[in-house]
Image (spheres, rainbow, N blue to C red):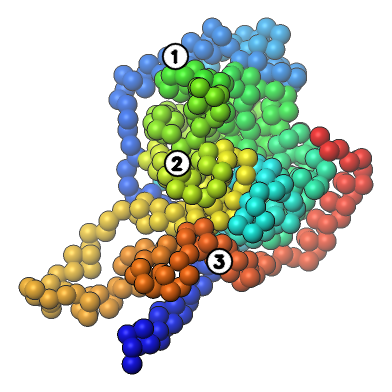
């Protein structure tokens, strides 16, 4: 019998065992991961105090514009801020005093209580990328996203245990009118997943629709007392909150739901080219947005968000996954902890157009910065391509695989009796291998992280199985996940009420495509 023939049954048995272990993982419920490794403290007290002083100067001397939101201006005026037209200037420590009512941690409840997530403390949550108008896969190439794509990504996020959160606008369903697509997106999160999710922020009434749908699924009284939905609120950097964002922010806050407040700073464009200045700007903008939630409803959950990136100054193109913003994230983490607020940071950022080496190098830089800075909620953990313009199917699976590895990384190293394996040393002795040792047999299924995408076989086996690269293997896994997807249960009465709400709200308004 040839070597190839003799090893084929072994390969088949190994493949079946691997698929069985993968199936068990897919059906696992993982409600976040607890960080057991320390955060990286880049600056000491002196450096952090200098950044805070620079942010205070920006807030007090330059101020911020709150455009098109008279209620926000009224709240600022009543709080003691200096309001001149739409420009708001903040006396020293005003924002910090307002933020004292914000919780340092909270629970975002899921339809399935086992999937509810603590956001804050040492818990880390991975959520998919957000907001891409395009999608991409190996078969269809780059194209505009549709509602079918959106629903598929929700199903993928549900099927992958390493993604704890369903996300929000995982891609834009551009085949649905702009003013109505939020209804289909929230319905998809509630139907095709039972993980926590995010709602719409593109208009105040769309935020309110999202919250109303959450009330249908969870009950009005429960939603009033608990966080079940989040909204991702961006500042119009530099130093502006437009009315669309501030009114959506206040809609979430007054419903006791979480606003994730995030500046969008590209160094050299929406912020200075120097990292310290960009960090000070980010601190100023984020504190102002977070404080507004507390003026609307003291005690409402809020997340201190961070989005620092750089610009290719020769072309003006945004760049992602570069070292300067990664260092900035480390500092933002320190500043958020000083404010005692949960932190959203970074993600699997890349400028690459395809899931290649550049994509994974840049994404790894950015994701490791998020882990080391102490982020609690990591949006854009999977799927990001082309500076956020494209959501990639294969990239989604490859990023989620890295999230799986990060679960192991963050757990640190145990130092119990089993970890030291002293009985194995006694059994094996000098000059022999550990493959057949009792300790190895007892631990082999859990001893090392096993990638669902990587190929660790010999060259000959890889060649004989088609010489598939990482995107091809990710494409195959993506198809398996969708083929094996099982929709979580939803009360038929809730499903019917959601469908009625969506149908009624769509009928009340004409289609808008911009």
Which quarter of the figure is the C terminus placed in? top right
Inspect this view and state whether residue 75 appears: no
Q: Secondary structure at mark 1?
A: helix
| Residue with the mark numbered 2 | 362
Local packing at callout 1 (Cα closer than 10 Å; few below 14, some 14-19, many 20+) is some
Inspect this view and state whether residue 457 appears: yes
Local packing at callout 2 (Cα closer than 10 Å; few below 14, some 14-19, many 20+) is many
Disc 2 versus disc 1: nearer the observer: 2
Disc 1 versus disc 3: nearer the observer: 3
| Residue with the mark numbered 3 | 476
Q: Of the numbered discs in the image, which one, if any, rests on residue 54?
A: 1
In the rendered structure, the answer to whether residue 505 lies left or right of residue 140 reads: right
Relative image position of residue 205 (x, y in whole percent): 79, 36
Q: Of the numbered discs in the image, which one, if any, rests on residue 384?
A: none
Instruction: Indicate which disc, 2 or 1, sits on the residue closer to the N terminus.
Output: 1
Local packing at callout 3 (Cα closer than 10 Å; few below 14, some 14-19, many 20+) is some
**CA distance separating discs 1 and 3:** 50 Å
**CA distance separating discs 2 and 1:** 30 Å
**CA distance separating discs 2 and 3:** 24 Å
């Amino acid at each position: 019998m040839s070597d190839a023939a003799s090893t084929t049954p072994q390969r088949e048995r190994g493949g079946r065992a691997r698929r069985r272990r993968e199936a068990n993982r897919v059906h696992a419920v993982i409600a976040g991961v607890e960080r057991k490794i320390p955060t990286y403290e880049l600056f000491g007290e002196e450096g952090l105090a200098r950044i805070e002083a620079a942010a205070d100067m920006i807030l007090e001397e330059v101020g911020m514009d709150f455009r098109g939101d008279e209620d926000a201006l009224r709240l600022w005026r009543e709080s003691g801020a200096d309001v001149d037209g739409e420009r708001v200037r903040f006396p020293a420590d005003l924002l910090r005093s307002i933020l004292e009512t914000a919780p340092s941690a909270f629970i975002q409840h899921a339809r399935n209580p086992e999937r509810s997530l603590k956001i804050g403390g040492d818990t880390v949550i991975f959520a998919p990328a957000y907001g891409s108008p395009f999608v991409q896969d190996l078969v269809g190439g780059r194209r505009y996203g549709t509602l079918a794509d959106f629903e598929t990504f929700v199903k993928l996020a549900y099927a992958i245990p390493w993604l704890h959160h369903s996300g929000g606008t995982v891609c834009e369903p551009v085949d649905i009118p702009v003013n109505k697509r939020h209804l289909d997106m929230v319905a998809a999160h509630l139907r095709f997943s039972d993980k926590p999710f995010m709602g719409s922020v593109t208009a105040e009434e769309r935020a309110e629709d999202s919250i109303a749908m959450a009330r249908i699924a969870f009950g009005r009284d429960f939603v009033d007392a608990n966080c079940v939905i989040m909204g991702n609120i961006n500042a119009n950097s530099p130093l502006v909150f437009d009315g669309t964002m501030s009114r959506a922010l206040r809609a979430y806050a007054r419903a006791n739901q979480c606003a994730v407040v995030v500046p969008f700073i590209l160094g050299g464009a929406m912020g200075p080219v120097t990292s310290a200045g960009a960090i000070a700007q980010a601190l100023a903008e984020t504190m102002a947005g977070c404080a507004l939630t507390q003026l609307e409803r003291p005690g409402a959950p809020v997340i201190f968000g961070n989005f620092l990136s750089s610009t290719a100054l020769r072309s003006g193109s945004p760049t992602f996954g570069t070292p300067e913003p990664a260092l900035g994230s480390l500092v933002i983490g320190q500043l958020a902890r000083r404010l005692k607020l949960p932190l959203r940071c970074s993600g699997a950022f890349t400028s690459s157009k395809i899931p290649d080496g550049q994509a994974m190098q840049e994404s790894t830089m950015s994701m490791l910065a998020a882990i080391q800075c102490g982020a609690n909620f990591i949006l854009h953990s999977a799927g990001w391509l082309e500076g956020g313009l494209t959501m990639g199917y294969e990239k989604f699976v490859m990023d989620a695989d890295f999230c799986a590895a990060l679960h192991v990384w963050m757990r640190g190293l145990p130092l119990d009796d089993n970890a030291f394996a002293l009985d194995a040393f006694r059994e094996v002795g000098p000059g022999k291998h550990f493959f057949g040792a009792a300790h190895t047999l007892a631990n082999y299924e859990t001893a090392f992280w096993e990638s669902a995408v990587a190929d660790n076989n010999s060259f000959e086996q890889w060649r004989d199985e088609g010489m598939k690269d990482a995107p091809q293997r990710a494409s195959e896994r993506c198809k398996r996940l969708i083929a094996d997807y099982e929709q979580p249960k939803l009360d038929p009465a809730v499903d019917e009420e959601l469908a009625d709400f969506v149908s009624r709200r769509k009928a009340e308004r004409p289609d808008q495509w911009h």
